[in-house]
Amino acid sequence: MNTPRRLLPSLSSLRALEALDRLGSATAVADELSLTQSAISRQLQTLEQQMGLKMIVRDGRRLTLTPGARKYAGEVRLALDQIAQASLRLRIAPDGGTLNLAILPTFGMRWLVPRLPDFARLHPQVTVNMNTRLQHFNFAREGFDAAIHFGQADWPDTGHMLLRHEQLLPVCAPSLVPDDRILAPRDLLQMPLLHIETRPDAWADWFHAQGVTLTKPVTGTLYDQFSTITQAAQHGLGVALMPDYLVEQDLALGNLVALHDRPTEAHGAYYLVWPLDKAGDTALLRFREWLASQVEPEDLLPR
């Protein structure tokens, strides 16, 4: 790649630009970068000269970015983050490479983590770094090598591997159904319903699967994780639509009761997904090959 030098400004100038966009004042930039304001000003002037256009609006001692420079600074921020992450990986990476994996908190902890000692035993030269993510993200911007994702196999520009489907069960505190009876699906519409933020259509899909026609949106309170919605259900705040493996123990102990006689398959499944441009990465290939050996249709999630 023979990129013209004028299109590759110095890192110090780019850091000054990014910091000015983020912090909003030359004084704050100087403090963060441990430089004088004059040095910051010179770096920005050098950047303008190299790019051949006006990027800084100067009003006395106050410096602001032009609209084009603000957009450029946002793109530079992503690039600087990627450089920092690449540098960190280079410093700590073992011979077998590093896999940076985004995981869903509950599924990752309950399904993946208990299995990882086996991967570590088979591939001790590969380091697996994990970060929890609840929402979709852009692989190019966050630098993950792969992610465990719930939904459809429709993440753009990726390959995928099906890990498992999920069975859902409506549950609540015993105090909400004193006679401990199984309710008809339509009866649940008269009860307070608890929703998971990442699956806003879960209740609507469940009612549809039970043959219930909805005439208006399914309302209720919103929670960000299964751990918090489980606590809410146990304290009688409403009915939660939960993966059956997560509530098995609470059902056995009587902390929760099931309001339907059998679980219903969720609209969506758990997948390992990865960007196509990293499909040949050695660490990812080893992880995928190992993960394929862990995926069995009859395999139950750990209780």
Image (tube, rainbow, N blue to C red):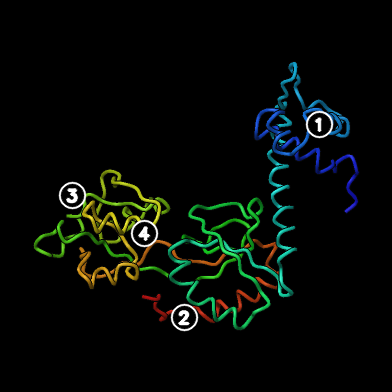
Left or right, 239 with reference to 99: left
Please, what secondary structure does the residue beneath circle 2 have?
Answer: loop
Do the residues under discs 3 and 2 have CB atoms within 8 angstroms?
Answer: no
Of callouts 1 and 3, which one flags the residue occurring earlier in the amino acid sequence?
Answer: 1
- Type of amino acid at the residue the image marks with label 3: Gln
Which dot, 2 or 4, sits closer to the camera?
Answer: 4
- Name the residue: 70% across, 38% down: 32
* Mark 1 to mark 3 CA distance (whole Å): 62 Å
Nearer-N-terminus badge (4/1)? 1
Does label 3 or label 4 sit earlier along the sequence? 3
Dot 4 amino acid type: Ser
* Residue 147 image offset from top left, x and y in percent: 56, 62
SS at badge 3: helix
Residue for badge 1: 44
Q: Looking at the rendered structure, which numbered label has been put on residue 296?
A: 2
Tell which circle, 1 or 2, labels the residue nearer the N-terminal end. 1
Q: Which numbered disc flags the more N-terminal residue, 3 or 2?
A: 3
Q: Which mark is residue 7?
A: none
Categorize mark 2 by other alpha carbons within 10 Å: few (<14), some (14-19), many (20+).
few
